[in-house]
Image (tube, coloured by chain):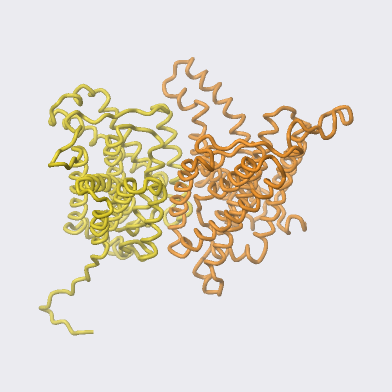
Chain colours: A orange, B yellow
């Protein structure tokens, strides 16, 4: 209970699913050999943390930010540029973290102070504008960021795939630097999610929910809402930058497509809404469903598209083409905002008979 | 309070002209900075044309927000749809577009633009009924719903037309420039400016001189009161929404011809631009939207000429500066 900050999943099915997901993630390197499974698992970890931090904003304060990928990108680029410029050593990793995290927090502070003061609806539009400017900036400053190509870099010795930590004849399988990196990603993501759970269940988190429900009343109670919203924005930015750092470490690369593009922002939105806003656990569920679908459902769509084009149907091959999977997710997104605003987690909780869960949003 | 006799004219609201002077001041300040007057004239003409196109696209967004407090994040989709639909007419009649006669060219362009407006307007009807109707009064859900709509629309465009860029070359008679002395002004920009001005004047006339406009302005001011007087404000809003969508479609066609290409992702870039314009202008204000569009275009053109590197963030800087000056935009219309 302590580790979950007194906020358990509150549904048997949900608990079971969460335990299964976490166990599967822990055991991935041994259960599912092969690079693809490990990549998918690492991506789920990174995105679970990223989406959870977005949930702090969207689900708990009710403010829509379109600049979340910007903070994610700042983390990615900070570590990539540091490792690229200073060579593969731990000093560079530390530099990337020390530069990236405060930079993200400061920018979030500036945006928050600037746009959360004026009408709340401005926040969404202004973050969108700032994020798109940042994206252009990152691709134009090619001497620093590598432009459209991004920056590839080498990891410190310990984390490289070639480094064998436990050789195959001891345990029956090889534990190498790649697997160590995976567990690093997993552990840090898990810590960040638990920290967010702590934040939303603190008195501070309660104030955020009060602001979400009725900003005017929260202000009347004496809370400085701008301060609270800006603070939440900074925490979310810090975790997003942290997730960006993990993502760059895992991919050994940072570029516009993997860390800054608007489509990642849409992915995050989809994951939060499908998983369930305002629950943090929804982030884990949403990220897992989305990334599994992205990696495995797409090939199914390819098969269906081929079948449709062989059957000579009009338009269907185009609609079922694997690249069009976002179309179906977009429809799912609209349907879930409309029919299940509380997402998978909210559905599971209300099925379990816990009535208080349904009113959480 | 001074007493008013019954025969006295009604007190006029104070005219706020500072925002109108702003673009003029910017243009004048730029003369010495740019140096050559002919370059300045060309750039100013370019800004006006670009500003008009942005205004046409953004006007619907600002009206919809002002009237019904709905922020449509999917507005960019109407722009892209308009542009794609126009290619349905432009591509088969490519030969007529190459003819060196203004009238033959316009005979193809006008139906293309009208068809785009009709399709965008019809799409507006569907979007309003399906996506926005269930979530009136809930900003968060509106943003999510319309963002979802944007994804679906964009992906459908990809599915139907494919991911490649479709070229939309300008008709022969609109190519080239008018040369006045040593000043060159592209013909298409003149046309775009004229259309933009016509749309602006038409909107202003409808809003200020007709009963419909009176109702719309009253709706912006106080929605419940208009409803209480027995008008169906929902129908009014639907009309405004469809008009705004149709205008976005028109803007999309004009933008496609301006850039001479159509791509499904054009909606993303333009969404950001029109958001900045709408914020600068003050949500809900047509006049502010007009000035904001010209300002953004001026900054893009002058800035692109003077300091190309700054052009990337210049829009943001402009927005920050304007919001520092007037936190609710140039003209704060709504009380929201």
Residue A75 visible in the shown view: yes
Q: Nearer the viewer, residue B324 or A81?
A: A81
What residue occupies the far right of the structure in this picture? A170
Is residue B168 found left or right of B146 in the rendered image?
left
- In the rendered view of the protein, which quadrant contains the N terminus of chain B? bottom left
Q: Residue A191, position in %: x, y?
A: 72, 51
Q: Nearer the viewer, residue A321 or A307?
A: A321
Q: Residue A86, position in %: x, y?
A: 65, 43
Give the residue at x 67% y 42%. Answer: A45
Give the residue at x 64% y 45%. Answer: A245
Q: Residue B123, position in %: x, y?
A: 34, 39
Give the residue at x 67% y 63%. Answer: A202
Quarter residue A168 falls in: top right
**How many marks overall?**
0
Q: Is residue B261 above or below residue B48?
A: above
Is residue A164 found left or right of A151 in the rendered image?
right
Quarter residue B94 falls in: top left
- In the rendered view of the protein, which quadrant contains the C terminus of chain B? bottom left
Q: Nearer the viewer, residue A333 or B47?
A: B47
């Amino acid at each position: 209970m302590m580790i979950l900050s007194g906020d358990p999943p509150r549904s048997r099915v949900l608990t079971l699913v969460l335990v299964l997901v976490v166990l599967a993630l822990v055991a991935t390197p041994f259960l599912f050999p092969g690079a693809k499974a490990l990549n998918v698992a690492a991506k789920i970890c990174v995105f679970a943390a990223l989406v959870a931090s977005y949930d702090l904003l969207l689900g708990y304060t009710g403010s829509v930010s379109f600049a979340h990928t910007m903070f994610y990108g700042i983390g990615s680029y900070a570590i990539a540029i540091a490792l690229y410029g200073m060579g593969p050593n731990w000093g560079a990793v530390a530099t990337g973290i020390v530069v990236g995290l405060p930079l993200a927090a400061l920018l979030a502070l500036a945006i928050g102070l600037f746009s959360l003061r004026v009408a709340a609806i401005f926040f969404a539009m202004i973050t969108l504008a700032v994020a798109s400017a940042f994206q252009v900036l990152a691709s134009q400053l090619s001497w620093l960021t590598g432009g459209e190509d991004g920056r590839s870099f080498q990891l410190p010795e310990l984390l490289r795939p070639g480094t064998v930590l436990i050789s195959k004849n001891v345990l029956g399988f090889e534990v190498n630097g790649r697997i160590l990196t995976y567990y690093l990603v997993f552990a840090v993501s898990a810590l960040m999610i638990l920290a967010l759970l702590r934040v939303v269940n603190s008195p501070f988190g309660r104030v955020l929910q009060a602001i979400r429900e009725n900003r005017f009343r929260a202000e009347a109670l004496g809370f400085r809402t701008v301060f609270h919203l800006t603070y939440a924005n900074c925490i979310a930015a810090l975790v997003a930058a942290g997730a960006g750092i993990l993502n760059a470490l895992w991919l050994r690369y940072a570029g516009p497509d993997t860390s800054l593009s608007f489509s990642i922002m849409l992915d995050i939105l989809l994951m939060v809404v499908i998983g369930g806003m305002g629950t943090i656990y929804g982030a884990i569920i949403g990220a897992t469903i989305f990334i599994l679908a992205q990696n495995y459902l797409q090939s199914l769509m390819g098969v269906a598209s081929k079948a449709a084009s062989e059957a000579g149907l009009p338009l269907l091959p185009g609609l079922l083409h694997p690249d069009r999977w976002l179309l179906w997710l977009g429809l799912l997104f609209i349907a879930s905002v409309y029919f299940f605003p509380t997402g998978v987690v909210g559905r599971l909780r209300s099925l379990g008979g816990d009535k208080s869960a349904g009113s959480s949003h | 309070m001074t007493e008013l006799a019954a025969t006295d004219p009604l007190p006029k609201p104070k005219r706020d002209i500072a925002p109108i002077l702003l673009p003029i001041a910017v243009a004048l300040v730029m003369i010495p900075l740019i140096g050559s007057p002919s370059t300045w004239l060309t750039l100013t003409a370019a800004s006006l044309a670009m500003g008009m196109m942005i205004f046409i696209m953004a006007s619907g967004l600002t009206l919809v927000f002002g009237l019904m407090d709905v922020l449509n994040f999917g507005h960019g989709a109407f722009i892209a749809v308009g542009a794609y639909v126009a290619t349905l007419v432009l591509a088969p009649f490519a030969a007529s577009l190459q003819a060196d006669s203004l009238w033959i060219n316009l005979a193809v362009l006008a139906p293309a633009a009208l068809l785009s407006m009709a399709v965008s307007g019809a799409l507006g009807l569907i979007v309003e009924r399906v996506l926005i109707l269930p979530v009136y009064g809930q900003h968060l859900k509106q943003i999510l719903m319309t963002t979802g709509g944007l994804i679906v629309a964009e992906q459908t465009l990809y599915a139907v037309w494919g991911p490649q860029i479709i070229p939309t070359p300008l008709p022969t008679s609109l190519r080239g420039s008018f040369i006045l002395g040593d000043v060159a002004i592209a013909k298409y920009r003149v046309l775009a400016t004229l259309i933009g001005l016509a749309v602006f004047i038409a909107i202003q006339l409808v809003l200020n001189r007709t009963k419909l406009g009176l109702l719309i302005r009253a709706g912006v001011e106080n929605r419940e009161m208009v409803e209480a007087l027995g008008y169906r404000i929902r129908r009014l809003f639907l009309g405004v929404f469809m008009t705004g969508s149709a205008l976005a479609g028109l803007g999309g066609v004009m933008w496609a011809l301006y850039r001479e290409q159509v791509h499904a992702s054009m909606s993303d870039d333009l969404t950001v631009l029109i958001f900045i314009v709408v914020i600068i202008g003050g949500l809900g204000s047509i006049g502010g939207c007009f000035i904001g569009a010209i300002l953004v275009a001026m900054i893009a053109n002058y800035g692109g000429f003077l300091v190309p590197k700054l052009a990337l963030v210049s829009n943001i800087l402009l927005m920050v500066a304007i919001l520092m000056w007037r936190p609710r935009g140039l003209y704060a219309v709504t009380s929201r």
